[in-house]
Every structure is written in C-alpha cells, then in structure tokens.
Image (cartoon, helix red, strand yellow):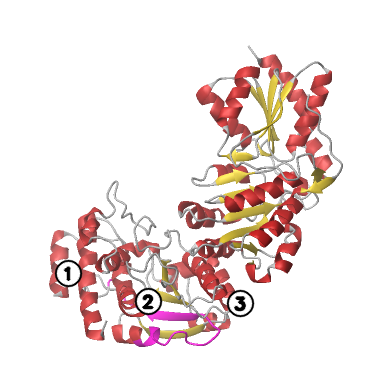
Amino acid sequence: MTKYTFTEKKDTRSGFGAGMTELGRTNPNVVTLCADLVGSLKIDTFIKENPERFIQCGIAEANMIGVAAGLTIGGKIPFATTFANFGSGRVYDQIRQSVAYSDKNVKIAVSHAGLTLGEDGATHQILEDLAMMRAMPNMTVINPCDFNQTKAATIAAANWKGPIYLRFGRPVVPVFTAPDQKFEIGKAWMVNEGKDVTIVATGHLVWEAIQAAEILEAQGISAEILNIHTIKPLDEKAILKSVRKTRCVVSCEEHQANGGLGDAVAQTLAKNFLAPQEYIAVENSFGESGTPAQLMEKYGLSAKNIVEKSLKVIQRKQ
Amino acid sequence: MEIKALQEKSKLYRRNILKYIYNAKAGHTGGSLSVIDILNVLYNRIMNVSPENFDSNLRDRYVQSKGHCVEALYVVLADKGFFPEEDLLTLCKYQSPYIGHPTKKIRGIEQNTGGLGHGLSICCGNALMAKKDKSPVRVFTILGDGEMAEGSNWEAFMFAAHYKLDNLCAILDYNKLQITAPNAEVMGLEPLDKKLEAFGWAVRQIDGNDIEALTQTLESLPFEQGKPSFVIAHTTKGKGISYMENVLKWHHGVPTAEQYEMALTELN
C-alpha cells in the first residue's frame, strides 16, 4: 500500500491558525470573531497583524453569529470562532436562521471537537455537531485530517461562497499530508487504493485508518481508504465507485454514530448500492475525562477497532 | 416627506395592511398596526434607502427583528416602489415569495428574520462594519416587546455599547401586549430605560404612533456621540381601529368581512 509517514505531530487548530495568518496577509475582506478563546483557536498572529480585522465578542456566542451575519452585508468574509460545542448546539438557531437560511457567507470555525479535547470531559466534548450541521440546508461541513489539510481547508473556505462549518481539534496528531496541498471542497481524497474493504474516514481518524490498513495488509487484506474531509456535500461518486469494487465499507469518525459521516454514507448506499457497513463512532454516549489516547481506546475509535470492524464487515459480504 | 404627508401615508398603510391581511386570511394585524408609523417615518423621512440605491453599499440598513409584523414592512416597501403592490395579493399563499416573515427573496429586505432575538446582532455586525470602513451608513432595527426577553438581545446590547456603535438605532415597538398576555404578566421589562442606560445606550421615550414625535426624535440621532441609540416607542397594539386597540386576540386575528368594512370606515 501507499506508504505514509510523519515527522511531527501538530494540532489541527494550529493548522487553522496558520491558514488565518495567511488569509490575513492575502485577503483584506477576511475578518475574525472570537468568543473569548483566542489562545485556543490559535489566531494570535492574525490578530497581531490585523488588529482592526479582529472582533472580540466575549462569551456571547449567539450574538457573535448574528454579528458575523451582519458583517457579510457589504462583503466581509467573517470567521466566527469558538469551541465546536459553542459554535454548533449552543447557537443552532442563530446559524439556522441568520446564516444558513439567509445564505450568508459566514465561516463557523470551531476547535476542540469530539472526545479528544480530553480532560474537560463531557460538557465540552461535542459529538453531535456534524449531525446538526449536515441536516441544515445551505451548509457545507468540513472536517480536515491534519495540520496541513486544516490550513488548506481554511484558505479554501475563504474562497468558497456560502456558509461553512469548519471543524478541527485540540490534540496533536500526525502531520502526513503535503504542506501546500490543493484543497477541493466536496472532493474525497483517495489515500490508498485497495480491493477488499473500503474505509471512509474523516478528521484525524484518517491516520487511524492508515494504521489499520497496514495491519490488514500484513494479514493479506487490501483496504481502500478515502479521506472524506468534506462531509457535506458528500462525494457520493467516489464512495460508490469504491464500494462497488470492495462491496463493503467501514465509516470512521469522532462523532456520534447517529447522524454523522456513517449515516451520510449509509444513506448514499441505501439509495444506490446495497453493501454491508460497520461504524467506527461513539454509540449513543457522552464522553468523559481522559487523555485523547485513552478516550479513543475506550470509545472504540482506534486503529485496532478499525481492523476489527473491517474483518467483520468483510465476513458480512454476500 | 412633510409631517402632514407622512400622516396621510400612515392612513394609507393601515388600509393596505388590513387589505392584504384580509385577503390572505393570515397575518399579524395588531403588531403591524402598532409598528407602521415607525416604519413610515424611517422609510419616508429618515433612512437613505430606495429601490434605486438598494444595491449601493451606501444605503442605510434596516433589519426587522420582530419579523412577524412583515405585513407592515411589505406595505411600505411596495409603496416605495421595491415591487408592485398587487404582488401582495399573494401574501402568505402557496408558492408566493411573500411569506409570513421577512425574506431576502423580496427586494428591499436585507435579512431573513422571524425567530426572535436575531435582528439586533445582525445590525451590530453591520454597524461595526460601517464604522471600520468609515462609511456613513446608519443601521436601524425594530424590536418587539415580547422578544426583549431573548438573552441574545442583551448580548447584543453589551456588544453595541462596547464598540460604541452610535451609527446604530434600535427602536422598540412597545405595544405592551405579546401573544399570551401583557408583557408585564409574561416577563416584565421595566424599568427598561434604566436597564438600557446601564447597558450603555442613549435612550429616549416617545409616543411611537405620533409621526411628529418620531420625526423629531429620529432626526436627532445619534442621541449621544459614542453610544448606540434606543427609542422606547410607546405604541398601541391595533392602533387606528377602535375594536382592535389593546385587544389581545388581534395579535394574530384576521377581520371578518363585516369587521373589515368597519375598519375601513374608521380609517376614512
């Protein structure tokens, strides 16, 4: 299989910060809002270099989303930033009415998604946000896999007309994609070609999928891996092409099984091509405190779990 | 437009509000009648906005936070020439773009609203953008008294004062009745002037159905340099139609044929 290595681990939120730094230097219409989490979102450099293009909103997220919508009237490209928990569920109605229904060019850029924010526990560990944002008309949903891809996705988001939910995380994860990659919203990335099982993964679970595929390869199983960095619009064509070949699929996400990437894939398969599917996702549970590694292990999101589900789904093939 | 002409406009607008609500068999009659004088003065005397300049970044902005009283806004926009008035015969009907809450699909409308507590934040963003761009644009919103209970409004009150948005004016259509009961019973607002002053706004209280008072007040914006302006416009729900005034059921009531005729007679 295609060999992937990494020389360093970095947090995806720093990839966002690097993207914002570049946008600050290249796109005068980009403005950033934040609900008192500047350090966590890694936007210090953007603010230092463009103080007049930063709007501190305080811990008042509902107002922040409305202000962002208002900034678009006249051509600004606002990035409203906070934790994923406070940029989705807390402000669902503001995003729905003032951004998505009004089709405003607002980018909601959120960090600390999922279990792997770690120690703070369940209140902050949003695992429902992809479902909420996927369900919303006009919304584009992006969940990149590493530092470099998050940086590229951030820059692509500024050039995309319309609302975007851009999701990334707190922990350091392997950097294995190219530094100056082209990021095409809505286009799946073929990580590895294979023939026995399709693994579709989003976010840092793409790295876990690569690890799993290496273990499977040692057992003589060839896994195809698709990086679904854009959950909506979903690259149905790429998924169907792959599953028509392998005839089974494992979906992997740091999210509830209900309503996320797995369900998006299942919907596509149900409509077009029936094939067994297994989910790597959190099953109807809130999170808890722990290190990212401990939580990934406990909630079944690691490479080992992907291997198990892959073997199972291959067994289920007719 | 002069005071006398504005007063005539209000009569016309009230007739049209009733006409199109009666035709649609739907709408927010009481609130549209309470807010119409404010909209009249804004669009015909205060704001620099018209069909001709609507695509210009220099237009003044209006966002109707109390979106449910869209009939009043549609009637004024039609009169300003944003769209043919007869379009309103499709109000609230299947496949009509003139739906029951403001939508950008209709020329003249800046922002979709309806769910309460959204409009002021949007105006804050717009007013801040104008400040940053050193633009002369002014931003206006009308809030309902019921929606003053929404926490998001109070987030926005803090924000507007923090950023010294003196190009922003919020007007409260304070008709004292919301869908269930009087505000004072549902969720009391008083002492509202003191609350808003404590939040850093410059506040004036006026009779919001008095064209002259509205004109004088809105012509003196901003009330204070460096502060956002708030007008507590005391209005009467159902204003102008005796049997509707201060009667709760006209929040969402539609007149019968007989009531409609009676209302027109009163307005003439």
Residue B263 — which label?
1
Mark-to-mark CA distance, 3 and 2: 25 Å
The part of the image, by quadrant, that contains residue A255 is top right
Q: Residue at x 72, y 41 (%)?
A: A145
Q: Tell me where residue A296 sits by quadrant.
A: top right
Q: Which residue is mark 2?
A: B47
Picture disc at residue B162:
3
Q: Are marks 3 and 1 in contact (CB under 8 Å)?
A: no
Going by the numbered disc 3, the residue's amino acid type is His
Q: Is any atom of residue A86 visible in this view?
A: yes
Instruction: Specify the quadrant that holds the C terminus of chain B.
Output: bottom left
Relative to A271, is A204 on the left or the right?
right
- Report x, y in % for residue B164: 57, 80
Q: Quadrant of the N terminus of chain B?
A: bottom left
Question: Hey, which quadrant is residue B14 in on the image?
Answer: bottom left
- At which x and y percent is residue B60? 42, 73
The residue located at (20%, 78%) in the rendering is B8
State which chain disc 1 sits on: B
Q: Are marks 2 and 1 in contact (CB under 8 Å)?
A: no
Chain name for mark 2: B
